[in-house]
Amino acid sequence: MATILNVGESIAQSPPTALPAWTNALIGHLNTGTVIHSGGGELDGAWHSQDSDELLVVIEGACTVDTVDGPTTLRSGDVALISAGEAHRVSTQAGTRLVAVEAASARRTPLSDPTFV
């Protein structure tokens, strides 16, 4: 039987994890080394890189993925693939819901804004 992962319920049952009003919740695993997170609310993310590819799927609302090449706006139904090692940050509008898929062992490295280096 398939496992149903409810993004809305996982967000509602988890405490805020980032400013200004963002909630991130682990909702499942793929194979042995990949995790699925749900996220919702409003986020003004910090610049970072990570040692794992990251897949973002916008379920509702919109988000902006900033990279050294500039910002890209994603809307409901859009998917972004961020390569391991790529400097980026994600910001969302209030009410946005998304799903992120990445390695369970992913490590993030905080960065200063690389667009001004």
Image (cartoon, rainbow, N blue to C red):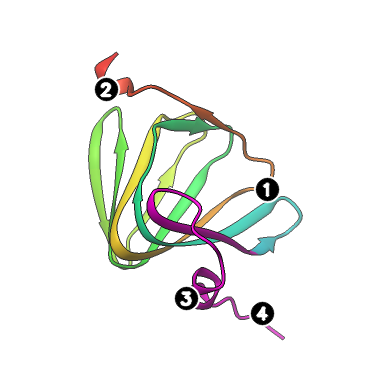
| Residue displayed at 55% across by 72% down | 10
Q: Position of residue 57 (x, y in %)?
A: 41, 60
Residue carrying label 3: 8
98 vs 44, left or right, is right
Badge 1 crowding class, 10 Å Cα cut-off, few under 14, some 14 to 19, many 20 or more, is some
Instruction: Check whether the beta carbons of the residues at disc 2 and disc 1 lie within 8 A of each other.
Output: no
Instruction: Check whether the beta carbons of the residues at disc 1 and disc 4 lie within 8 A of each other.
Output: no
Kind of residue at badge 4: Thr
Q: Which residues are magenta?
A: 1-27
Q: Nearer the viewer, mark 4 or mark 2?
A: 2
Q: Position of residue 3 (x, y in %)?
A: 66, 79
Q: Position of residue 93 (x, y in %)?
A: 26, 58
Residue carrying label 1: 104
Mark 4–mark 2 Cα distance, whole angstroms, equals 41 Å
Say whether disc 3 or disc 2 marks the residue closer to the N-terminus.
3
Residue carrying label 4: 3
Instruction: Check whether the beta carbons of the residues at disc 4 and disc 3 lie within 8 A of each other.
Output: no
Q: Quadrant of residue 41?
A: bottom left
Kind of residue at badge 1: Ala
Say whether disc 2 or disc 1 marks the residue closer to the N-terminus.
1
Instruction: Check whether the beta carbons of the residues at disc 1 and disc 3 lie within 8 A of each other.
Output: no
Mark 3–mark 2 Cα distance, whole angstroms, equals 34 Å
**Where's the C terminus, which quadrant?**
top left
Q: Secondary structure at mark 4?
A: loop
